[in-house]
Amino acid sequence: MANTSSAKKAVRSSNKKQMHNLGWKKRIKTAIKNLQNLIKDGKSQEDLKSSLSLAQKVLDKASKEKVMHRNKINRIKSKLSNKVAKSSDAKPTAKMYRDWE
């Protein structure tokens, strides 16, 4: 337990910052999970792009609030956008081959 008044204030401040950061990290995880679920379900490009922009918006705001380092935020955004781009690649199907014949 803190003995001095400044140490007690530091504990209060630390707890307040911890609660603030945990709230932001929960928002980040929720946005990322929503996007990953849409990718896994094979949703349309419009849904993926809107969810990606929402996730990027949350990540940018968290970076502004200094919840995480901006380079880590940029790495996460890059990974998410690459996943969306890979999921949008058209996979050849039997129907596509039939159309060419």
Image (tube, rainbow, N blue to C red):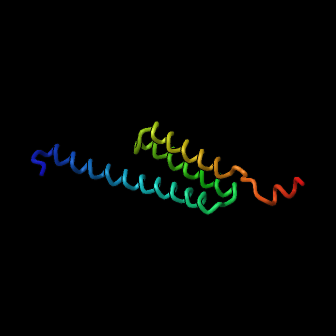
Q: Quadrant of residue 72?
A: top left
Q: Quadrant of residue 65?
A: top left
Residue with the most extreme front position: 101
Residue with the most extreme bottom position: 41
Residue 46, percent from left and from top: 69, 55
Between 69 and 14, the residue placed more toward the observer is 69
Residue depicted at x 46% and y 36%: 71
Between 30 and 6, the residue placed more toward the observer is 30
Between 19 and 50, the residue placed more toward the observer is 50
- Left or right, 54 with respect to 95, comes to left
Residue with the most extreme left position: 3
Residue 92, percent from left and from top: 75, 53
- Left or right, 45 with respect to 65, comes to right
Residue with the most extreme top position: 71
Residue depicted at x 66% and y 61%: 43
Residue depicted at x 46% and y 55%: 29
Q: The C terminus is located in which quarter?
A: bottom right
Between 41 and 76, the residue placed more toward the observer is 41
Residue 30, percent from left and from top: 48, 58
Residue depicted at x 40% and y 56%: 23
Query: Compared to 88, does 63 lie above or below?
Result: above
- Left or right, 89 with respect to 32, comes to right
Count of all numbered marks drawn on residues in the image? 0
Q: Quadrant of residue 35?
A: bottom right
Residue 85, percent from left and from top: 65, 47
